[in-house]
Amino acid sequence: MGILSRKIWRYMTNNLGQFLAASAVVMGGIIVYIAMSSAYYSLEQSRDDFYRNNQFADYYFQVVKAPAGVTRQIEELPGVRRVTGRIQRDFSIIKDNQERATARVTGYSFPPGNGLNQLTLVKGRLLSGNNDSNEAEVILDPKFLAANRLGWGDKVKILV
């Protein structure tokens, strides 16, 4: 053992509390760094998987009015792989207790699963397309249901 090694060993044994405290701080920092790196990697992978599974678009834009042929023209642009056009509008609705609310209605292609920005179904079922009555089926955001105190199977009136 060299003279410097003995000096370090003597310093560590004489100042054991300080040495252990510094070691604990360094180990805590390493543990936090590894935990945060793992959490970041996991969240990034989850986000990428969700975007890929739901076919999220890289870009989107809104127009007030456009003919149906605009989507074909955009799809022909270089670098564009796929285009989906949707109709979106805000409507007033009347709930069973005669209270008013606003709902944003977004049209999706049928059958679901062909376009961009697909939905993730949390509860219930996708639209069947076999609805013979005059009532329209909708897929609602669970937060909208909770905020408006609606339940599955409730009916709402849309004012158009």
Image (tube, grey):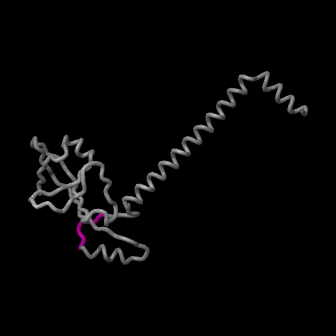
In the rendered image of this protein, does residue 110 appear above or below residue 36?
below
In the rendered image of this protein, does residue 80 appear above or below residue 19?
below
Q: Quadrant of the C terminus?
A: bottom left
When asked about the image quadrant of residue 24, the answer is: top right
Q: Which residues are magenta?
A: 62-67
In the rendered image of this protein, does residue 119 appear above or below residue 77?
above
In the rendered image of this protein, does residue 44 appear above or below residue 15?
below
Task: Give the x, y percent position of residue 114.
Answer: 31, 66
Dominant secondary-structure state across the stretch colored magenta: loop
Q: Please name whichever residue, 81 or 113, is drawn nearer the observer in this view of the structure.
A: 113
When asked about the image quadrant of residue 84, the answer is: bottom left
Q: At 54% across and 42% down in the image, what residue appears?
A: 36
When asked about the image quadrant of residue 30, the answer is: top right
Q: Please name whichever residue, 8 or 125, is drawn nearer the observer in this view of the structure.
A: 125
Q: Quadrant of the N terminus?
A: top right
How many numbered circles are shown? Answer: 0
Q: Is residue 77 magenta?
A: no
Relative to 5, is 124 on the left or the right? Answer: left
Task: Give the x, y percent position of residue 70.
Answer: 29, 74
Q: At 32% across and 54% down in the image, what residue appears?
A: 120
Q: Is residue 65 magenta?
A: yes
Task: Give the x, y percent position of residue 140.
Answer: 23, 51
Task: Give the x, y percent position of residue 43.
Answer: 47, 48
